[in-house]
Amino acid sequence: MIARVVRILFVAWFVLLAGLVALARSTDWTPGCCIGLYLLLFGHPTLLAIEMLLARHIAARSDAPRARWRDLPRAVLRNRGLWNPWMRRLRRLDRAFVAVNLEPVFTTLDEYVPQVERAVRRMETATGLAPVIVAHSMGGLVARAWLRSRATHKRSDGTAEAARLITIGTPHRGTWLARLARPVNARQMRIGSRWLTTLTGREPPTLQGLITSWWSECDQIVYPPPTAVFPGSEAKQLRGVGHIALTAREEIWNEIRRRIDY
Protein backbone atom coordinates (compact mmCIF):
# COMPACT_ATOMS: atom_id res chain seq x y z
CA MET A 1 0.00 0.00 0.00
CA ILE A 2 2.70 2.50 1.00
CA ALA A 3 4.80 1.64 -2.06
CA ARG A 4 1.78 2.20 -4.31
CA VAL A 5 1.13 5.59 -2.72
CA VAL A 6 4.78 6.58 -3.24
CA ARG A 7 4.59 5.66 -6.93
CA ILE A 8 1.37 7.65 -7.35
CA LEU A 9 2.92 10.66 -5.63
CA PHE A 10 6.00 10.45 -7.89
CA VAL A 11 3.85 10.38 -11.03
CA ALA A 12 1.79 13.30 -9.70
CA TRP A 13 5.00 15.23 -8.95
CA PHE A 14 6.34 14.61 -12.47
CA VAL A 15 3.06 15.64 -14.12
CA LEU A 16 2.84 18.79 -11.99
CA LEU A 17 6.45 19.68 -12.76
CA ALA A 18 5.92 19.26 -16.50
CA GLY A 19 2.75 21.35 -16.32
CA LEU A 20 4.49 24.15 -14.42
CA VAL A 21 7.38 24.23 -16.88
CA ALA A 22 4.95 24.47 -19.79
CA LEU A 23 2.98 27.21 -18.04
CA ALA A 24 6.14 29.13 -17.16
CA ARG A 25 7.32 29.06 -20.77
CA SER A 26 3.97 30.31 -22.03
CA THR A 27 3.69 33.11 -19.42
CA ASP A 28 7.31 34.27 -19.57
CA TRP A 29 8.23 32.86 -16.13
CA THR A 30 5.94 34.75 -13.77
CA PRO A 31 6.89 34.94 -10.06
CA GLY A 32 4.17 32.43 -9.19
CA CYS A 33 5.57 29.88 -11.64
CA CYS A 34 9.10 30.42 -10.33
CA ILE A 35 7.97 29.90 -6.73
CA GLY A 36 6.04 26.78 -7.71
CA LEU A 37 9.05 25.32 -9.51
CA TYR A 38 11.31 26.09 -6.57
CA LEU A 39 8.95 24.31 -4.18
CA LEU A 40 8.73 21.26 -6.43
CA LEU A 41 12.46 20.99 -7.02
CA PHE A 42 13.89 22.24 -3.73
CA GLY A 43 10.97 22.22 -1.29
CA HIS A 44 11.95 18.95 0.37
CA PRO A 45 15.64 19.86 0.92
CA THR A 46 14.52 23.26 2.23
CA LEU A 47 12.13 21.59 4.68
CA LEU A 48 14.91 19.22 5.79
CA ALA A 49 17.23 22.17 6.38
CA ILE A 50 14.59 23.96 8.47
CA GLU A 51 13.93 20.79 10.50
CA MET A 52 17.64 20.29 11.16
CA LEU A 53 18.14 23.90 12.23
CA LEU A 54 15.18 23.54 14.58
CA ALA A 55 16.60 20.27 15.95
CA ARG A 56 19.97 21.98 16.55
CA HIS A 57 18.27 24.86 18.36
CA ILE A 58 16.23 22.53 20.61
CA ALA A 59 19.33 20.46 21.39
CA ALA A 60 21.20 23.61 22.44
CA ARG A 61 18.30 24.64 24.70
CA SER A 62 18.23 21.15 26.25
CA ASP A 63 21.97 21.05 26.82
CA ALA A 64 22.10 17.95 24.59
CA PRO A 65 24.61 17.02 21.86
CA ARG A 66 23.95 19.21 18.83
CA ALA A 67 24.89 18.95 15.19
CA ARG A 68 28.07 20.64 14.03
CA TRP A 69 27.51 23.33 11.40
CA ARG A 70 29.80 21.54 8.94
CA ASP A 71 27.73 18.34 9.24
CA LEU A 72 24.36 19.91 8.40
CA PRO A 73 24.81 20.29 4.60
CA ARG A 74 25.89 16.66 4.30
CA ALA A 75 22.98 15.50 6.42
CA VAL A 76 20.50 17.40 4.21
CA LEU A 77 21.96 16.22 0.90
CA ARG A 78 22.39 12.58 1.94
CA ASN A 79 19.14 12.15 3.83
CA ARG A 80 17.90 9.18 1.86
CA GLY A 81 17.83 5.47 2.49
CA LEU A 82 15.79 2.37 1.74
CA TRP A 83 15.49 -1.16 3.11
CA ASN A 84 15.83 -2.71 -0.38
CA PRO A 85 19.67 -2.82 -0.49
CA TRP A 86 19.77 -4.65 2.85
CA MET A 87 17.10 -7.09 1.70
CA ARG A 88 19.11 -7.88 -1.43
CA ARG A 89 22.11 -8.62 0.78
CA LEU A 90 20.02 -10.90 2.98
CA ARG A 91 18.93 -12.85 -0.09
CA ARG A 92 22.54 -13.32 -1.15
CA LEU A 93 23.33 -14.59 2.36
CA ASP A 94 20.34 -16.93 2.16
CA ARG A 95 18.84 -15.47 5.33
CA ALA A 96 15.11 -15.43 5.92
CA PHE A 97 13.53 -12.03 6.49
CA VAL A 98 10.15 -10.33 6.62
CA ALA A 99 9.66 -6.63 5.85
CA VAL A 100 6.74 -5.01 7.68
CA ASN A 101 4.98 -1.82 6.59
CA LEU A 102 3.10 -0.29 9.50
CA GLU A 103 -0.34 0.43 8.05
CA PRO A 104 -2.64 2.29 8.17
CA VAL A 105 -0.39 5.32 8.53
CA PHE A 106 -2.41 7.21 11.15
CA THR A 107 -3.56 4.97 14.00
CA THR A 108 -2.45 4.07 17.51
CA LEU A 109 0.93 2.41 17.96
CA ASP A 110 -0.70 -0.58 19.64
CA GLU A 111 -2.70 -1.30 16.49
CA TYR A 112 0.54 -2.23 14.71
CA VAL A 113 1.54 -4.91 17.25
CA PRO A 114 -0.39 -7.78 15.56
CA GLN A 115 1.49 -7.07 12.31
CA VAL A 116 4.79 -7.57 14.12
CA GLU A 117 3.50 -10.74 15.78
CA ARG A 118 2.51 -12.23 12.40
CA ALA A 119 5.92 -11.41 10.95
CA VAL A 120 7.71 -12.95 13.93
CA ARG A 121 5.65 -16.12 13.67
CA ARG A 122 6.67 -16.44 10.01
CA MET A 123 10.32 -16.03 10.96
CA GLU A 124 10.07 -18.58 13.76
CA THR A 125 8.41 -21.05 11.42
CA ALA A 126 11.07 -20.55 8.76
CA THR A 127 14.15 -20.62 10.99
CA GLY A 128 13.16 -22.10 14.34
CA LEU A 129 14.99 -19.17 15.95
CA ALA A 130 14.07 -15.97 17.72
CA PRO A 131 14.39 -13.14 15.18
CA VAL A 132 16.67 -10.14 15.09
CA ILE A 133 14.33 -7.15 14.73
CA VAL A 134 15.62 -4.07 12.92
CA ALA A 135 13.28 -1.11 13.41
CA HIS A 136 13.47 2.45 12.15
CA SER A 137 11.90 5.44 13.89
CA MET A 138 8.37 4.70 15.14
CA GLY A 139 8.92 1.01 14.36
CA GLY A 140 11.21 0.72 17.38
CA LEU A 141 8.38 1.75 19.71
CA VAL A 142 6.04 -0.74 18.04
CA ALA A 143 8.64 -3.47 18.54
CA ARG A 144 8.87 -2.56 22.22
CA ALA A 145 5.07 -2.70 22.50
CA TRP A 146 5.17 -6.15 20.86
CA LEU A 147 7.85 -7.33 23.31
CA ARG A 148 5.73 -6.07 26.20
CA SER A 149 2.76 -7.98 24.79
CA ARG A 150 4.74 -11.20 24.59
CA ALA A 151 6.02 -10.75 28.13
CA THR A 152 2.47 -10.13 29.38
CA HIS A 153 0.75 -12.90 27.41
CA LYS A 154 3.05 -15.92 27.32
CA ARG A 155 2.64 -17.96 24.15
CA SER A 156 1.55 -21.55 24.61
CA ASP A 157 4.21 -22.87 22.21
CA GLY A 158 6.99 -21.52 24.41
CA THR A 159 8.86 -19.69 21.64
CA ALA A 160 11.41 -17.09 22.67
CA GLU A 161 11.20 -13.38 22.14
CA ALA A 162 13.54 -11.43 19.85
CA ALA A 163 17.22 -12.32 19.81
CA ARG A 164 18.03 -8.62 19.40
CA LEU A 165 16.20 -5.36 18.80
CA ILE A 166 18.23 -2.90 16.72
CA THR A 167 16.54 0.49 16.71
CA ILE A 168 17.49 3.24 14.27
CA GLY A 169 16.45 6.79 15.09
CA THR A 170 13.67 5.61 17.40
CA PRO A 171 12.07 8.16 19.76
CA HIS A 172 12.45 5.90 22.79
CA ARG A 173 11.79 8.82 25.12
CA GLY A 174 9.66 10.77 22.67
CA THR A 175 10.58 13.63 20.38
CA TRP A 176 10.08 17.38 20.60
CA LEU A 177 8.77 17.49 17.01
CA ALA A 178 5.74 15.37 17.92
CA ARG A 179 4.23 18.31 19.80
CA LEU A 180 3.58 19.92 16.40
CA ALA A 181 1.71 16.90 14.99
CA ARG A 182 -1.95 15.93 15.41
CA PRO A 183 -2.28 12.21 14.40
CA VAL A 184 -2.81 9.91 17.34
CA ASN A 185 0.43 7.96 16.88
CA ALA A 186 2.40 11.22 16.72
CA ARG A 187 0.82 12.41 19.97
CA GLN A 188 1.85 9.12 21.57
CA MET A 189 5.45 9.95 20.65
CA ARG A 190 5.51 13.25 22.52
CA ILE A 191 8.06 13.52 25.31
CA GLY A 192 6.42 12.40 28.53
CA SER A 193 3.25 11.16 26.83
CA ARG A 194 0.92 8.85 28.73
CA TRP A 195 1.50 6.08 26.17
CA LEU A 196 5.28 6.20 26.55
CA THR A 197 5.03 6.37 30.34
CA THR A 198 2.72 3.35 30.42
CA LEU A 199 4.93 1.39 28.03
CA THR A 200 8.05 2.04 30.08
CA GLY A 201 6.31 1.15 33.33
CA ARG A 202 5.27 -2.29 32.05
CA GLU A 203 8.53 -3.35 30.40
CA PRO A 204 10.77 -6.02 31.95
CA PRO A 205 14.08 -4.77 33.41
CA THR A 206 15.98 -7.15 31.12
CA LEU A 207 14.87 -5.24 28.01
CA GLN A 208 17.78 -2.80 28.07
CA GLY A 209 20.20 -5.67 27.47
CA LEU A 210 18.29 -6.64 24.32
CA ILE A 211 18.43 -3.28 22.53
CA THR A 212 21.00 -1.45 20.43
CA SER A 213 20.07 2.24 19.96
CA TRP A 214 21.54 3.89 16.85
CA TRP A 215 21.21 7.69 16.88
CA SER A 216 22.56 10.86 15.30
CA GLU A 217 22.86 14.44 16.47
CA CYS A 218 21.70 15.44 12.94
CA ASP A 219 18.42 13.51 13.21
CA GLN A 220 15.84 16.15 12.30
CA ILE A 221 12.86 14.05 13.41
CA VAL A 222 13.92 12.57 16.77
CA TYR A 223 15.43 15.18 19.07
CA PRO A 224 16.90 16.33 21.35
CA PRO A 225 19.41 13.50 20.69
CA PRO A 226 19.26 11.60 24.02
CA THR A 227 15.62 10.74 23.33
CA ALA A 228 16.74 8.25 20.66
CA VAL A 229 18.59 6.13 23.22
CA PHE A 230 16.76 3.53 25.28
CA PRO A 231 18.02 3.94 28.87
CA GLY A 232 20.68 1.37 29.68
CA SER A 233 20.87 0.02 26.11
CA GLU A 234 23.95 -0.23 23.92
CA ALA A 235 24.00 3.24 22.32
CA LYS A 236 25.84 3.93 19.05
CA GLN A 237 26.15 7.37 17.47
CA LEU A 238 26.54 8.16 13.78
CA ARG A 239 27.72 11.72 13.17
CA GLY A 240 26.21 13.96 10.54
CA VAL A 241 23.41 11.59 9.44
CA GLY A 242 19.78 12.54 8.86
CA HIS A 243 16.77 10.54 10.00
CA ILE A 244 16.14 8.59 6.78
CA ALA A 245 19.81 8.25 5.82
CA LEU A 246 20.40 6.23 8.98
CA THR A 247 18.82 3.25 7.19
CA ALA A 248 21.61 3.24 4.60
CA ARG A 249 24.62 3.21 6.89
CA GLU A 250 27.17 0.44 6.53
CA GLU A 251 27.91 0.48 10.26
CA ILE A 252 24.35 -0.64 11.01
CA TRP A 253 24.45 -3.31 8.33
CA ASN A 254 27.65 -4.67 9.85
CA GLU A 255 25.90 -5.09 13.18
CA ILE A 256 22.94 -6.78 11.51
CA ARG A 257 25.31 -9.16 9.73
CA ARG A 258 27.06 -9.97 12.99
CA ARG A 259 23.78 -10.61 14.79
CA ILE A 260 22.39 -12.98 12.13
CA ASP A 261 25.50 -15.10 11.66
CA TYR A 262 24.62 -18.61 12.80
Image (cartoon, grey):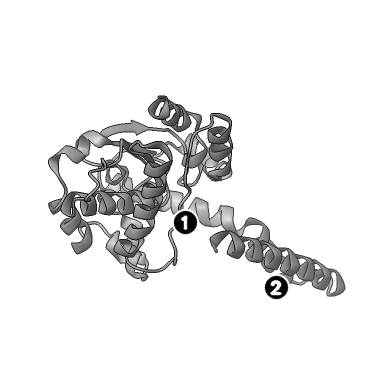
Looking at the image, the residue that sits furthest to the right is: 26
Q: Nearer the viewer, residue 20 or 169?
A: 169
Picture layout, residue 80 above or below residue 174: above
Q: Quadrant of the C terminus?
A: top left
What percent of the width, then of the height, locates residue 70? 49, 35
Left or right position of 197 against 31? left
Mark earlier in primary sequence (2, 1): 2
Confirm whether residue 71 shows in the render. Answer: yes
Q: Residue at x 38, y 54 (%)?
A: 118
Q: Nearer the viewer, residue 142 or 173?
A: 142
Residue with the mark numbered 1: 101
Q: Which mark is residue 32?
A: 2
Q: Quadrant of the N terminus?
A: bottom right
Left or right position of 215 against 95? left
Amino acid type shown at disc 1: Asn
| Front tag of 2 and 1 | 1
Q: How many marks?
A: 2
